[in-house]
Amino acid sequence: MKIIILPPARLELRKAVLHYNRQREGLGAELRDEVRRAAQSLVANHQLYRLRHGDYRRVNLRKFPYYLVYFIRQDKILINAITHASRDPEYWLDRPLP
């Protein structure tokens, strides 16, 4: 399976990395690494997470209070949001998928 991080999710990650780097240099890189590991784990375990209303799934990060929202389309995992757990959990629902 191929992982595709869609542009809105990439922007969310970039903003979060900047935010954490302002708190402590290198902390943003730790977030980016954790997102990368979580995304890579989906290749083997994409069906593991519960299918939610709206045909999406999500995986929580371990160290940071973020989760990845993703859709499975044919042989692709489309990550549509990388969001802080305190946000409205469905703020991204109107984002189009390619």
Image (tube, helix red, strand yellow):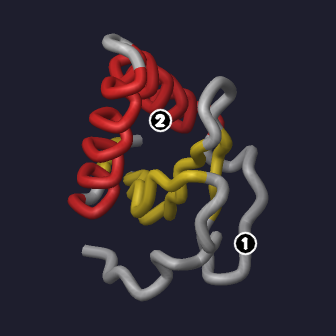
On screen, residue 17 versus residue 42, left or right, reads left
Q: Please, what secondary structure does the residue beneath circle 2 have?
A: helix
Which residue is drawn at the image coordinates 73% and 50% (left, top)? Answer: 49
Which residue is drawn at the image coordinates 53% and 49% (left, top)? Answer: 68
Which residue is drawn at the image coordinates 21% and 59% (left, top)? Answer: 7
Question: Mark 1 is on which residue type?
Answer: Arg
Instruction: Using the rendered view, name the quadrant where residue 59 is placed.
Output: top right
Viewer-proximal residue among 20 and 2: 20
Considering the image in quadrants, where does the C terminus appear? bottom left
Where in the figure is residue 18, as x and y percent of width and height? 28, 35
Residues marked 1 and 2 touching at CB (< 8 Å):
no
Q: Which residue is mark 1?
A: 52
Where in the figure is residue 80, as x and y percent of width and height? 40, 62
On screen, residue 51 versus residue 54, left or right, reads right
Where in the figure is residue 87, as x and y percent of width and height? 59, 65
Where in the figure is residue 16, as x and y percent of width and height? 37, 42
* Residue 83 higher or lower than 35, as above or below: below
Q: Please, what secondary structure does the residue beneath circle 1 have?
A: loop
Considering the image in quadrants, where does the N terminus appear? top left
Q: Which residue is mark 2?
A: 39
